[in-house]
Amino acid sequence: MAVLTATLCINAVCPFLVYSILIRHYSSFAALLAASLIPLLDNVWHLVRHRRLDAFGFLMLVSLVLSALAALLGGNERLILVRESLVTGVIGLLFIGSLSLDKPLLFWLAGRFLAKPVSARLAEHWGHPRLRAMFRCMTAVWGILLLVEALLRVLLVFCLKPAAVLALSGPCLYIFIGGAALWTYLYRMRNRAVFASFLHTQDRSSAS
């Protein structure tokens, strides 16, 4: 829980606060660029300490950089609203694209938030086909839902007035993220026996 709280504060809360303060005095691009330095520095520190990137911090960094680049595009109201879907769309593609790797994106995200002993056990048993299939399934669902959310918001931009899009955009994102999180929880509960079997195997091997 402490790891989760610290990660969210560093990579989500702090960038938001920095952006909220700087946007009053500087351009959106400058504020986003400054906010992106926080997850960037956290990633550098994590890379030096653990010899690997922090998956969650990397995602937050990508989203902030994409937002900053989108802010440079400018354009009319509809283009500005469409570009906001760019971030979730690209992150959704990262989830889907990671399925071609040995370990999908959600595996690394889980390793960032789980306790170190549990994360180590998951890594140790990663060769188990059932475990690999479960993480690939969860990664695919997150990627698909993020892509659908991005496409839905683009559709709303061209079907509704800008004021209505602004009112619905935030809740739309929260509903999809919340839905994905709820589905993940239920999926894990349904397959909790699989996780328990890995932990039990580890305990038996340690005892022997």
Image (cartoon, helix red, strand yellow):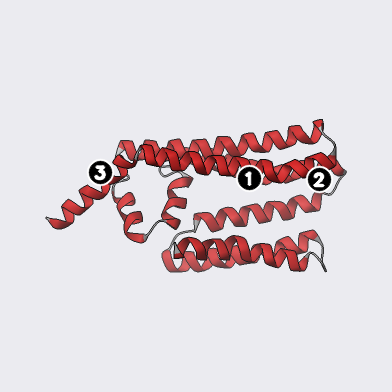
The type of residue carrying mark 3 is Ser
Q: Earlier in the sequence, mark 2 or mark 1?
A: 2
Q: Earlier in the sequence, mark 1 or mark 3?
A: 1
* Number of the label disc, if any, that sits on residue 80: 2
Q: Is residue 144 above or below residue 207?
A: above
The type of residue carrying mark 1 is Tyr
Q: Position of residue 4 (x, y in %)?
A: 48, 60
The answer for how far apart the CA atoms under marks 3 and 2 are is 49 Å
Q: Earlier in the sequence, mark 3 or mark 2?
A: 2
Q: Position of residue 49 (x, y in %)?
A: 44, 68
* Disc 2 and disc 1 in contact, CB within 8 angstroms: no
Instruction: Tell me the quarter of the image containing the N terminus.
Output: bottom left
Report whether 34 appears left or right of 198: right
Residue in the image at 48% along x and 64% along y: 47
Residue in the image at 43% along x and 51% along y: 110
* Number of the label disc, if any, that sits on residue 63: none
Q: Is residue 196 above or below residue 43?
A: above
Report whether 113 appears left or right of 166: left
Tell me the crowding category of disc 1: few under 14, some 14 to 19, or many 20 or more residues within 10 angstroms, Cα based. few
Q: Is residue 186 above or below residue 114?
A: above
Q: Is residue 142 above or below residue 24?
A: above
The answer for how far apart the CA atoms under marks 1 and 3 are is 34 Å
Q: Position of residue 173 (x, y in %)?
A: 65, 43
Q: What residue does disc 3 label?
A: 197
Mark 3 or mark 2, whichever is nearer to me: 3
Could you tell me which secondary element the residue under label 3 belongs to? helix
Could you tell me which secondary element the residue under label 2 belongs to? helix
Mark 2 or mark 1, whichever is nearer to me: 1
